[in-house]
Image: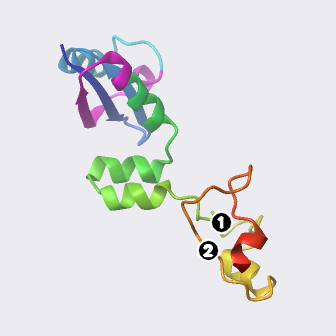
Amino acid sequence: MSFWAYILRCADGSYYVGHTEELDVRIGAHQSGLIEGYTNTRLPVTRVWSQEFTTRGEALDAERQIKGWSRAKKEALIRGDWDGVQVLSRKLFVRASFDTPPVAATQDERAEHDENIPLILSSERSNSEGRVSKDARRQ
């Protein structure tokens, strides 16, 4: 038996992520409004991505993981842009808005005030907050 994780694009442009064992039946139920909840009030819906898994647990894990992703990362997955998914997985971005001032300094601004110490990005173990310590950057 196969299990599926899937993404639907709703009429309002939002995305719905789910999992099922019968993909075509489940998508049809979403499209016809038989499933109460999020998609029922955002019809019509269109399947934009799906992937088959061998166990329900794998499909559920994929659903939960994707639900936690940003819109941009979901759209990269939908496009099949694996480089984009990887780039959007990194925690190197500071979101900026033209309407509000940034809440944190950019990496370039921090570098100007940090004695011109180069920032070293590494896959090595870091401190408990997941950051490379200032001492580690001096090495």
Nearer-the-camera pick, 56 or 100: 56
Residue 88 drawn in magenta: no
- Which residue shows up at 56% across the image and 66% down it? 122
- Which residue shows up at 68% across the image and 82% down it? 108
User: Would you call the spot at circle 1 few (<14 residues within 10 Å), some (14-19), or many (20 or more)?
Assistant: few
Identity of the residue furthest to the front in this view = 139
Image colouring: rainbow
Nearer-the-camera pick, 32 or 87: 87
- Which residue shows up at 65% across the image and 65% down it? 97
Please state, as top left, top right, bottom left or bottom right, where the C terminus lies in the image. Answer: bottom right
Please state, as top left, top right, bottom left or bottom right, where the N terminus lies in the image. Answer: top left
Q: Residue 94, image x and y in percent?
A: 64, 65
Q: Which label sits in the foreground, 1 or 2?
A: 2
Q: Residue 81, image x and y in percent?
A: 29, 57
User: Circle 2 — which element?
Assistant: loop
Q: Which residues are magenta?
A: 38-59
- Tell me: 63 left or right of 48: right
In primary-sequence order, the first of circles 1 and 2 is 1
Within the image, what quadrant is residue 13 found in? top left
Rendered position, 68 above or below 122: above
Mark 1 touches mark 2? (CB < 8 Å)? no
Residue 57 drawn in magenta: yes
| Tag 1 residue | 97
Kind of residue indicated by mark 1: Ser
User: Would you call the spot at circle 2 few (<14 residues within 10 Å), some (14-19), or many (20 or more)?
Assistant: few
Q: Residue 64, image x and y in percent?
A: 47, 29
Kind of residue indicated by mark 2: Ile
Q: CA distance from mark 1 to mark 2?
A: 27 Å
User: Circle 1 — which element?
Assistant: loop
For residue 120, the mark is 2
Within the image, what quadrant is residue 3 found in? top left
- Which residue shows up at 48% across the image and 54% down it? 89
